[in-house]
Image (cartoon, helix red, strand yellow):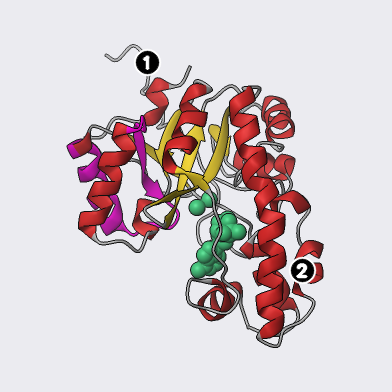
Amino acid sequence: MPESTPSAVINYDLHCHSTASDGLLSPDEVVRRAAGNGVDVLALTDHDDIAGLPLARATAAEVGIGFINGVEISAEWEGTLFHIVGLDFDADNAALNAGLDNISSGRSERAGRMAAELAKAGIPGTLEGALRFAENPKLISRAHFARYLVECGVCRDVRSVFETYLVPGKPGYVDHRWASLGDAIDWIVGAGGIAVVAHPGRYRVSPRDLRRFLADFKTLGGTAVEVVSGSHTPDHVGQFARLARDFGFLASRGSDFHGPEESFTDLGKMSSLPAGVSPVWEKFR
Ligand code: AMP
Ligand code: MN
Ligand code: MN
Ligand code: MN
């Protein structure tokens, strides 16, 4: 007879956003919603900013779920923008904080250039409009511009704003210097954390370039990839589980939740990690 009933699978959600970047809910609302959805351990991973972590951590303690420090860093590799999630780092680390400050200060300047380009394309006033949607103005994002352009009727939804205005080759897209891949990994690993490739299924690179990217990521000190992501299809999950095994990467799982109206996948509502991969949480402190 078994001595105890096997415990249910622990529900980890290690990728989501709050109003500290481009999410729609405040850090405490995100944590309460996660707990309500059955998440046992949550990481809040705002873009290029960790200001939401203290409130999220305090709320997690209050509602009785586990909490892991997180961030999603915008990093460039061979001219393409990748997102690198950092998990389980020391949030007081000076180099990490200085690096993040550096990227976020660049966002305001970029937003000004985006607004100027959109004005040339016949849409004035978008900086002021986007800022109304940004609770943390330092972290002004394309997502805030998209919400404003929907509100003023230029496009019917956020997705079509991106397709029409905000991706490379479109009038509201401007180049920007983000972190280098090496810097992003150094900041995370230097603060005692784990560097994870966010949603590898979303990058528009060839399979060959993706493998070159993953090889560089590993050489630079990255150790994990998101196998289960809110933006992955079942095919992606199989593909990235295989790549994780080939490269010896740990596997992560996260919804990439931004808000109830904007995200396909709610907090904690993703499939489980497939068999045969090593979960990233086995390395948490
Ligand atoms: P930024 O960090 O300012 O470049 O903005 C990128 C953010 O915009 C991403 O983190 C997503 O939240 C959002 N985003 C990017 N592409 C799309 C898309 N095609 N549809 C909807 N949201 C998008
Ligand atoms: Mn986002
Ligand atoms: Mn991302
Ligand atoms: Mn994200």
**Residue drawn at 24 percent across, 48 percent down:** 212
Give the magenta-colored segment's residue range: 220-246
Q: Is residue 97 left or right of residue 269?
A: right
Foreground of the two, 62 or 69: 69
Kindly check if marks 1 and 2 are in contact, taking CB atoms under 8 A apart as contact: no
**Residue drawn at 49 percent across, 37 percent down:** 184
**Residue drawn at 52 percent across, 78 percent down:** 170
Residue closest to the far left: 246
* Residue 177: percent from left, percent from top: 54, 53
SS for dot 1: loop
Q: Is mark 2 within 8 Å of ligand 1?
A: no
Q: Is residue 97 left or right of residue 124?
A: left
Of the numbered discs in the image, which one, if any, rests on residue 43? Answer: none
Q: Amino acid at mark 1?
A: Ser
Residue closest to the far top: 3
Q: Which residue is identified by label 1?
A: 4
Alpha-carbon distance for marks 1 and 2?
A: 58 Å
Q: Which residue is identified by label 2?
A: 127
The answer to whether residue 88 is above or below residue 174 is above
Q: Tell me the quarter of the picture where residue 8 sits.
A: top left
